[in-house]
């Protein structure tokens, strides 16, 4: 959540940010509830102080005076109880609307309503030229017996797929390639839980506006993660991290689950948009002053991984209306998909500033300062199954085979995937 001081000190800036993000939150109502809540809180606090004073008088009073004072306190307590209940109701209303305010976009974020407002920063690599009609990853995968969505549909329903044979080895080659690249850069490998408590998911900012996207376990206070960010960053909830120990960098591998509730009719074939997928993710906790540098560093690592695979891609600065509520800035990497003759998102790198850590109560003590601050949290994709899609399409051959990127061969043990 945002710092409430921002709302009180500069509501105009919050209104502007909300407008730029395309949100329909009534900031005036949030401010009204905050003022009402603060007014009631003051009354409750004043009455508690008065009650303490009366209590001291009762202790020193004579028997007759004590009886009068005690009798008067009964009515006082009833009024106090009524006022505290009123405060609880108003506070709950305030917390609900306040928690729906998304993070404030950083000043350099392009302003726009949707993906049409995104800005391409650069294009890298050469798009492959084929002397044949390029096939889709699904066509390639089915022909090579390495992807099977038809049987997955029978077993699990739509938006699922089996990876088989060389596709499995290729996916784990991507995982090892990512780990071998990132661990020397100070990333600690983690295999996180894929279930988190409801409160944890809320603290990460994923239950305020997109609850329908996240799987809930019936009868349990738990949700399935859609990204390892949701279980790795909360590792440090309610902790104070010393500035000298920061940044804390993690590289996590996990299976992720998404309902794709808002994606009806989109990418229904293949394994691009599925309910279950594996992901290697970079997560960072750092002091606020180093947040900008860490975000740039994460994007540079993503580009290093992509250039190592020799895949054509572009870097895109997302506009205010096209990234999630917890984020203050998101930069995507989109990879060229020949069968669609366009770029598709394969990576994302976001800074959430102190939006998540404020709810999680993750603080730090920067070196040379005794003042506690909320850490900044960042996340970035290393690889998902979409990288496999990009490899199959960009490295396909006329005979139906697929050449394996050179950097992955030592991990998977083969140079080519051919027809059986």
Image: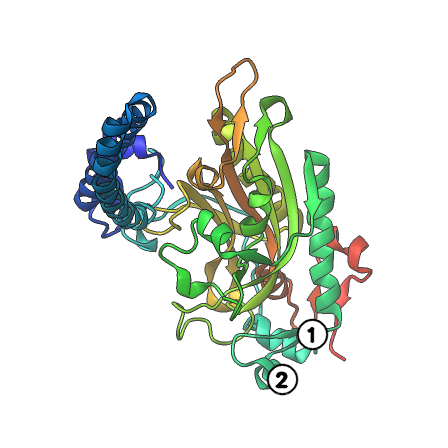
The one nearer the camera, 24 or 363, is 363
Counting from the top left corner in percent of width and height, residue 146 is at: 69, 74
Name the residue that disc number 2 marks.
151
Name the residue that disc number 1 marks.
146
Counting from the top left corner in percent of width and height, residue 91 is at: 29, 45
395 to 203, vertically: above or below: below
User: In terms of image quadrants, where is residue 240?
Assistant: top right
Q: Earlier in the sequence, mark 1 or mark 2?
A: 1
Q: Is residue 157 left or right of residue 398?
A: left
Q: Alpha carbon of mark 1 to alpha carbon of mark 2: how far? A: 12 Å
Residue drawn where x is 40% and y is 75% of the image = 265
Residue drawn where x is 57% and y is 38% of the image = 284
Of helix, strand and loop, which one carries label 1?
A: loop
The colour scheme used here is rainbow
Looking at the figure, which quarter contains the N terminus? top left
User: In terms of image quadrants, where is residue 84?
Assistant: top left
Q: Callout 2: 10 Å neighbours few (<14), some, many (20+)?
A: few
Counting from the top left corner in percent of width and height, residue 169 is at: 75, 64
Of helix, strand and loop, which one carries label 2?
A: helix
Looking at the figure, which quarter contains the C terminus? bottom right
As drawn, which residue projects farthest toward the bottom?
154
Residue drawn where x is 74% and y is 44% of the image = 180
Asked whether residue 13 appears in the rendered view, the answer is no
As drawn, which residue projects farthest toward the front?
63
């Amino acid at each position: 959540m945002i710092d409430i001081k921002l709302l009180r000190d500069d509501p105009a800036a919050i209104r502007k940010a909300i407008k730029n993000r395309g949100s329909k939150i009534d900031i005036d109502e949030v401010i009204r509830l905050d003022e009402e809540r603060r007014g009631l809180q003051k009354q409750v606090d004043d009455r508690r102080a008065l009650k303490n004073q009366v209590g001291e008088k009762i202790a020193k009073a004579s028997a007759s005076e004590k009886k009068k004072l005690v009798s008067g306190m009964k009515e006082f307590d009833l009024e106090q109880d009524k006022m505290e209940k009123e405060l609880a109701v108003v506070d709950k209303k305030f917390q609900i609307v306040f928690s729906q305010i998304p993070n404030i976009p950083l000043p350099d974020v392009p302003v726009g309503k949707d993906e049409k407002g995104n800005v391409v920063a650069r294009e890298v690599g050469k798009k492959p030229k084929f002397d044949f009609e390029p096939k889709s990853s699904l066509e390639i995968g089915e022909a090579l017996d390495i992807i099977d969505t038809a049987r997955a549909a029978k077993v699990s329903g739509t938006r699922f797929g089996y990876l088989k044979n060389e596709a499995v080895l290729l996916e784990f080659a991507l995982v090892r390639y990512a780990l071998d690249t990132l661990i020397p850069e100070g990333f600690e490998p983690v295999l996180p839980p894929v279930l988190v408590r409801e409160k944890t998911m809320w603290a990460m900012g994923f239950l305020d506006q997109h609850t329908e996207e996240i799987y809930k376990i019936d009868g349990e206070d738990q949700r399935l993660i859609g990204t390892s960010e949701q279980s790795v960053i909360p590792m440090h909830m309610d902790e104070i991290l010393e500035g000298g120990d920061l940044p804390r960098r993690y590289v996590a591998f996990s299976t992720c689950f998404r309902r794709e509730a808002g994606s009806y009719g989109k990418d229904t074939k293949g394994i691009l948009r599925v309910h279950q997928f594996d992901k290697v993710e970079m997560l960072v906790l750092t002091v606020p002053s180093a947040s900008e540098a860490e975000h740039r560093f994460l994007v540079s690592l993503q580009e290093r991984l992509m250039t190592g695979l020799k895949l054509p891609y572009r870097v895109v600065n997302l506009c205010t209306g096209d990234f999630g509520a917890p984020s203050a800035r998101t930069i995507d990497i989109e990879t060229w998909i020949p069968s669609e003759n366009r770029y598709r998102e394969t990576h994302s790198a976001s800074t959430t500033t102190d939006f998540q850590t404020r709810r999680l109560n993750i603080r730090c003590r920067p070196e040379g300062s005794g003042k506690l601050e909320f850490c900044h949290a960042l996340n970035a994709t290393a690889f998902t199954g979409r990288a496999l899609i990009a490899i199959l399409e960009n490295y396909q051959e006329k005979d139906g085979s697929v050449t394996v990127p050179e950097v992955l061969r030592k991990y998977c043990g083969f140079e080519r995937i051919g027809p059986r």
